[in-house]
Amino acid sequence: MFRRAEEHSLLSALLDGCCAESNSALVLVEGAVGCGKSEFLETAAEEAERRGAIVLRAAGTPAERGHPLAVLGQLTADAPAGALPPPPAPETAERVGSMRAFAAAVRELSTSVPVVICVDDLHHVDELSSRYLLHLARGTRRSRVLLVLAGSAHDRGADPLLRTELLRLPHFVPLRLTRLGREAVRAMLPDATDSEAAAGADAGAGAAAGAVAEADRLYEATGGNPLLLRALLQDPQARPGEAYAQAVLACLHRCGPATDELAAAIAVLDDLATPAHLARLSGATEAAADRALEALSAAGLLAPTGRRGLRHPAARAAVLDRLDPAGRAALHREAALLARASGASDTAVAGQLLAARHTGEEWALPVLRSAADQHLAQGRPDRAEALLRLAHGACPDDALRAEVGIRLAAVAGRTDPAAAEHHLAAPLAAAGAGLLGPAALGPLARTLAAQGRIDESVEVLERLAAADVHPGGGRGEDPLDGLSAFPRWAVSARAGAPAAAPPARLPRTAVHPAALWALPVEQEESTAARSAELFLRGATLAEGTVEPVAQALRTLLHLDGAGRALPWCEEFTHRAALREAAGWQAVFGGLLAEARLRLGDLAGAAETAAEVLSATPAPGGGVLLGAVAATRVRALLAMGRLEEAGAVLARPVPAEAARSVHGLAHLRARGHHALATSRFHAALGDFLDIGRHMKRWGLDRPRVLPWRTDAAEALLRLGEAHQAERFLADQLTTRDAADPWVRGTTLRLRASLREPKERQAMLSRAVDELQRSGDRYELARAMADFGQVLREAGEPARAAMVERRAWHLAGECGAEALCERILPGHTGEGAAAVDTADAPDAGLVASLSESERRVALLAVHGDTNREIAKKLYITVSTVEQHLTRVYRKLNIPGRQGLPVDLHPGVPELA
């Protein structure tokens, strides 16, 4: 039995008095359902038998409540043969003489041995048996008889005066069993005391704190009800499961005949469960509802003070799950009407409508939409989406359905970007048919722009301009306002579009949707990255901040380098994952994969993209997810995993991708796959399509998407050197020509069009630029070309050193195909062992000064002493002195012994 020291002590004293001192007693054990009355009776019976007493057991049941003398029959049957007379015939049962005879027989039995009579569920005992028990209690005051009765404190049974009569007896002992307190629950935890004793001081304190927290959790779930607590401890990891649910239902069933219907009403109403509402929904009177609530509260089944409904969601689910679907829906529908009539909040009313799947009331649609907005403001987007889905199906016309669909798309984007895109299909069709007014056109354009669907957003804004009315009814606000992280740097006036964007008749105050995806113009680039990082430091993740945060991350990635953007991409991807927002995770995870790819972390980029795709409800579907898949494809191609890349690329892409910013990423990945599989014309077509779109939208920035170098590479494979040169020269005249990554990748390809001597110098510059960019993969490609040129120029020593460095970089990136091209037959673990066999100790490398490390790094890249001197603005003699000290410190004979994994130790070289 649960630990009840005081009750045990009283029981022992009464048994001792009965067995040793011939003191009779009458004990009435009362308590709420599940508080241990039956268990207490069983303990009393066991203790009595241990003392040598005769124990007679009986229990009332609802089924036998209408059968006269049913309980008396149980007692006589439990007595030794012939010790007690059988129950009298019905015609004589009510005679006082029959009752006296029964009491006399019990007294006679007690003269030879103590008699303990235990009767459980007194509230279910038939009326005639209860009168025999009362007569027995009066007639055995001076006998060795202990009468222990147990019953509900809230159900007085067939004879409501029985307890009053018992109370008047001088040997009456009341005993009230209550629910366990928090400390008692703590004492019930398995091995709680032993674990504390075995632990040390610090560990013991931690274990104690954990035990307190666990006890609090158990208490909150059970209210200290022993039956519920025992069941909860039987469920796996003590989390509410099947045992807990069955215990809840058992408690409800034993609380009284009207409790089942009332419990269903409580579960349906939940926070709305006032006595008046419960009476209305269950069909009971308010007085009956009050009594039932009192019994349920005493059992700990109801929520604590300040709340309504059942204590735990699992308890509510257990009650609701046993209702038939039609009856349950009818209850929720009635509850919605009650809630609406009583002035309950829109969220409470909408919750009942949702549970009933009912939208037949004229006020249902505005209540559902209002409640969805409130749930969003309170951070419950899943609930908001469910309400909007219900509202969407209840809209009476296309225009209203489109408005709800647009809102649903914005909300669904948090968890399912593909679904969010799908939700806009009907509103777009309605807009095309002229069915939408300004109130819907503005939000539609905004949502399309946020999804990167520029052309469609422009078309909607043109319709809005034709209406010449602002969505809110006025003029002067931008429909796309709030999507940007900071002032839009891509336009000189709010009504403008990015440079080279096609003219469009937009609302006078509207920004062109492409501006939301543009990088700053030249004069603002120096401050844009700092502004973006400052914004990110104070940004929180919410429905209205996803697009501005993504814009700030793109700015950092393309203006300040992937290394600077990477930790921020990781941070916001992590935040989205914590919120279980797969859609937001796709936005930030896609940028994270792109940042890793831009740094040459091919495996990291492929893995990140795969994680994003697997976290979404429809992997590979949708425009946004297509862009994430494209990043994975490019990483896999660089790693030499062509078949796997082709499988990812084969996934269907929505038609909307062709008019979306995200569709450009798919085109580029498809083009790279075509290059890798010798389909050069197809690759060229994809790259040129990218260029046409980027120019048309005014987004032509090689930092973001270097379509010219991609096209030039395809042209080189086709033997069109002149055309390739034209594209490469054009790229070096763009505003991004000074960017190290853009310049380095362009110079690498352009070098292939030059004579050997000029090619060598151009590749040397490409290596320098790509070293600054941080892209290890592109650096490895440039160094591989540089090593080949050096070898062709008759400098095998320099070529070998450069190729070793290129091979090492390619291996770090996971680019096995590139490794094989650089040093055929030297891939895998064996090559790694050869590469590091003679490498200097890391401690020796760390001893190099900053100046020595600069010189050594350039030497590893294949620069001559004169070239190093020119780049570092020092004399050739100084270079020679630095290298001499490096050789001595690293204990190597010369340049060939320099470590290929040498990395810059100062920011200037990073």
Image (cartoon, helix red, strand yellow):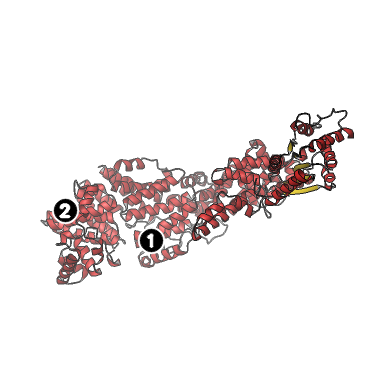
Badge 2 density bin: few <14, some 14–19, many ≥20, Cα 10 Å: some
Exactly how many numbered labels are in the figure? 2
Q: Assign the C terminus to one quadrant of the image.
A: bottom left
The answer to whether the residues at label 2 and label 1 have Cβ atoms under 8 Å apart is: no
Instruction: Report helix, strand or loop for mark 2.
Output: helix
Q: Is residue 250 above or below residue 502?
A: above
* Residue 463 showing in the rendered view: yes
Instruction: From the viewer's side, name the closer residue of 269 and 755.
Output: 269
Q: Quadrant of residue 250?
A: top right
Instruction: From the viewer's side, name the closer residue of 696 and 557.
Output: 557
* Residue 364 showing in the rendered view: no
Residue assigned mark 1: 556
Place of residue 306 in the rendered image (x, y in percent of width and height, measured from the top left): 68, 55
Place of residue 274 in the rendered image (x, y in percent of width and height, measured from the top left): 72, 49
Instruction: From the viewer's side, name the closer residue of 706 and 249.
Output: 249
Q: Residue at x 16, y 53 (%)?
A: 788
Place of residue 908 in the rendered image (x, y in percent of width and height, measured from the top left): 28, 67
Which sits earlier in the primary sequence, circle 2 or circle 1? 1
Q: Residue at x 38, y 50 (%)?
A: 608
Q: Is residue 786 left or right of residue 675?
A: left
Residue assigned mark 2: 788
Residue type, numbered disc 1: Leu
Q: Which mark is residue 21?
A: none
Instruction: Report helix, strand or loop for mark 1.
Output: helix
Q: Assign the N terminus to one quadrant of the image.
A: top right
Instruction: From the viewer's side, name the closer residue of 292 and 106.
Output: 106
Q: Quadrant of residue 553?
A: bottom left
Q: Quadrant of residue 700?
A: bottom left
Place of residue 363 in the rendered image (x, y in percent of width and height, measured from the top left): 66, 47
Q: Is residue 588 above or below residue 149?
A: below
Query: Which residue is farthest right?
Result: 96
Q: Is residue 185 left or right of residue 97?
A: left
